[in-house]
Amino acid sequence: MKKFLRKMFRIMAWTMPFLLLLAWWGVENVLPYWPIKPFRQDPEHATWRIPKGAHPENYGLTAEPFEVLTSDSVRLEGLYIPAINPPASAPKTLILLHGISSCKEFFLPSAEKLSHQGFNVVLFDLRAHGQSGGEYCTFGYCEKHDVSTVVDMLLARDSTQKIGVMGHSLGGAIALQALAEDKRLQYGVIESTFNSLEAVVEQYGVNYFGIRSPWLAHHTLDKSAVIADFDPYAVIPSESARHITQPIFMSHGDQDERIPWQLGKENFDRLASADKQWYLIPNGHHNGTWQAGGAAYERALMGFLKRQ
């Protein structure tokens, strides 16, 4: 037994420095890219998310492709989907913002429902996602201005339309920041999002590595900031919420395994909006909120949208 223990000790003595060096290299050279370098999803191979496929016509929709250039010269690719049942009054348009490592096509099932409710729907790939340009995701630091660029395009098309924004997860965080900055956005729907970038990076350390380390989250973001040239500590959706006066519908699954619902509730509690509605989805996870919420959730959401 002693011989075995001595052998194990020698093995550990030789391997431990290597493992520590490998861990240090990962912290310095891999983790900083993890938040800001999303996977570019290919919707053609994502039938698990969009069973009808990635083409608008599969949903009975017509779509007009568009391209806009942001203020820092990033090309964004999108689809403009006109309402199937347009209202007799001023047009209603809803911009849909997807989550991290997702793409615009994942919102086609939602676009189908919204189009039948009289909404023009705008889908576009966020920077560093899908078919859009850009190398890094900045979690709303730059993307909130990208939303304003899309609003510019829409108002140039028809200045009478009433424009709202709906975002899921990353898209929800961007939507909150955009609503605070651009009052041309007249209402918002926010699903399953976080209160600050620093808090969610710390939470993802728990989700993926089983440890909560404020130091590691801070160190990762410090290096991400240099790589992507942005201020991650300025990405605080809960602070943006203090400056939002537009009507807001906010929802979160009570079983969200990625972003605890309490982080989303903090955003809601800080909203300055007089018209705001919180919907906690029973047995709802991070994705699939509409499916988990069922008919009751859809009635509440559509009721809010129709009031706008």
Image (spheres, rainbow, N blue to C red):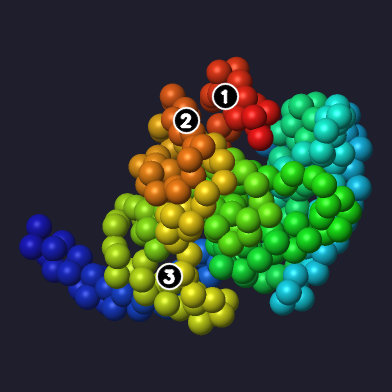
Which labelled disc corresponds to residue 279?
2
Is the residue under label 1 in contact with that under label 2 (CB below 8 Å)? yes
**Residue situated in front as seen by the camera: 52 or 109:** 109
Residue 171 sits above or below residue 83 on the image = below
**Which of the 4 quarters of the picture holds residue 297?**
top right
Type of the residue with mark 1 = Ala
Task: Report the residue at 78% width, 35% height from top.
Answer: 119
* Quadrant housing residue 26: bottom left
Q: Of the residues shown, which amino acid type is indicated by label 2?
A: Tyr
Image coordinates of residue 1 in percent, x first then y, are 9, 57
Q: Residue at x 80, y 69 (%)?
A: 69
Of marks 3 and 1, the one in the foreground: 1
- For label 3, count other residues whose C-alpha is less than 10 Å away and answer few (under 14), some (14-19) or many (20+): some
Residue 18 horizontal/vertical position (percent) = 34, 77
Q: Which mark is residue 300?
A: 1
| Side of 164 relative to 168 (left or right) | right
Residue 266, above or below 155: above
Dot placed on the residue nearer the N-terminal end, 2 or 1: 2
Along the polypeptide, which appears first: circle 3 or circle 1? 3
Circle 2: is it few (<14), some (14-19), or many (20+) Cα within 10 Å?
some
Q: Residue 80's mark?
A: none
- Look at label 3 and name its amino acid: Tyr
